[in-house]
Amino acid sequence: MSLAPLEPKLELFDTHAHLEDDRFRGEVDQVMVRARQAGLSQILAVGTTHLDSQACLERARREPMVVAAVGLHPTHLAGLPEDAFGQVEALALDARVVAIGETGMDNYWKEVPLEVQEASLLRHLELSRRLNKPVILHCRDAGDRLMTILRDNCDRHGTLRGILHSFCGTADEAKQALELGLHLSFSGMITQKGNQPLLDIASSIRRDRLLVETDSPYLAPRPQRGKRNEPAFVVHTCAALAECHGLSLREMAQITTNNARRLLGLESAI
C-alpha cells in the first residue's frame, strides 16, 4: 500500500513585529511557541528607539527564528539623546540586523515636527544604502510628502530596497511605491469589514512584491479583533491576501515568505 505524500509544512514570515513592546512583557516565550505552532518560520523584530533596537538585536541573537531591524520611529524622536542615531548605526553593523527602521513620516500624531521626521528619514535612507540593508517605512496621513521625499532620493541615488509596512494608502501611492522599488507589506487591516478598497489594491499588487506582517501588538486581524496582536495571527492576513489573489493559503505563504527572505538577504533559507 502506498502512502500519500505528506504536505509540506506551512511557512510564514511576519515582516513586522514589536516584540519588545510592554504589552509582551514576560510573555514573549509563550508568544514564540504559538508562532511556531501557527507555522511561522521567521519574524522580523522591528526597533523604534535606540534602546528597543538594542533589545531587538539581543533577541535575534538568542532566537534563531528572529532577525532584527534597527531604527528610530518618526513619532518617537522627541526627547532622544543626541547620539541615538549613532547607536542605531553601530547596531546596524551586526549580521543579525537585516533591515533599517522603522523610519518614515507621520502626520497623525503632532508631537514631532515633519521637518524633524524628514531629517531622520534621510539619515535612515543613507544608512540603508550604505549598508545595503532594506529600509522599513512607516506612513500615516503623510503619503504625498513621503512619496515626494522618496522620489527625490531615488532620483539622486537610484531605486530603493525596502518595505512600505502595514500599507493602507491609495492605489496611486501603491503604484509609486512599486516604481521606487519597494515591497508592500499588508497587515490585519485587510481583514477588517469595510476595507474592500484596500483589498482591491492588494489584489492588484504584483506577487513578487507582496509581504505580510502583524505590526503586533497592534492591528489584530478580524478573527482576533479586540485581542493583543501577535505573530501567530499573521496567518489570517496571509489567508485574506491569498483569497484576493485567487491562491491557496499555502501558495501565498510560500510567495510572501520567499519574497521576504530574498529582500532581507536570507536566501539560504529558501
Image: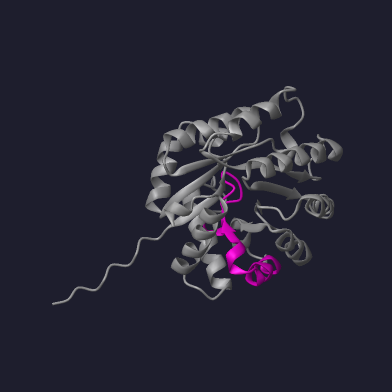
In the image, farthest residue toward the left: 1
* Residue 240, placed above or below residue 43: below
| Number of numbered discs overlaid on the protein picture | 0
197 left or right of 44 in image: right
Specify the quadrant of the image occupied by residue 69: top right
Residue in the image at 50% along x and 66% along y:
252
Colour logic: one colour
Name the residue: 63% across, 48% down: 134
From what the image shows, is residue 128 above or below residue 39?
above
User: Magenta span has 200?
Assistant: yes
Along the line of sight, the residue nearer the viewer: 70 or 269: 269
Vertical placement of residue 83 versus 221, above or below: above
Q: Position of residue 153 (x, y in %)?
A: 80, 49
Rendered location of residue 61, percent (x, y): 46, 34
Query: Is 202 placed left or right of 228 in the picture?
Result: right
Give x and y (percent) for residue 116. Answer: 83, 35
Nearer to me, 100 or 138: 100
Q: In which quarter of the image is the N terminus?
A: bottom left
Question: Residue 234: x percent and y percent?
Answer: 51, 55
Q: Which of 36 and 24 is in front in this view?
A: 36
Q: Is residue 64 visible?
A: yes
**Residue at (37, 51) in percent of width and height:** 37
81 in the magenta segment = no
Which segment is the magenta one? 196-223
Image quadrant occupied by the C terminus: bottom left
Q: Is residue 164 visible?
A: no
**26 relative to 133, above or below:** above
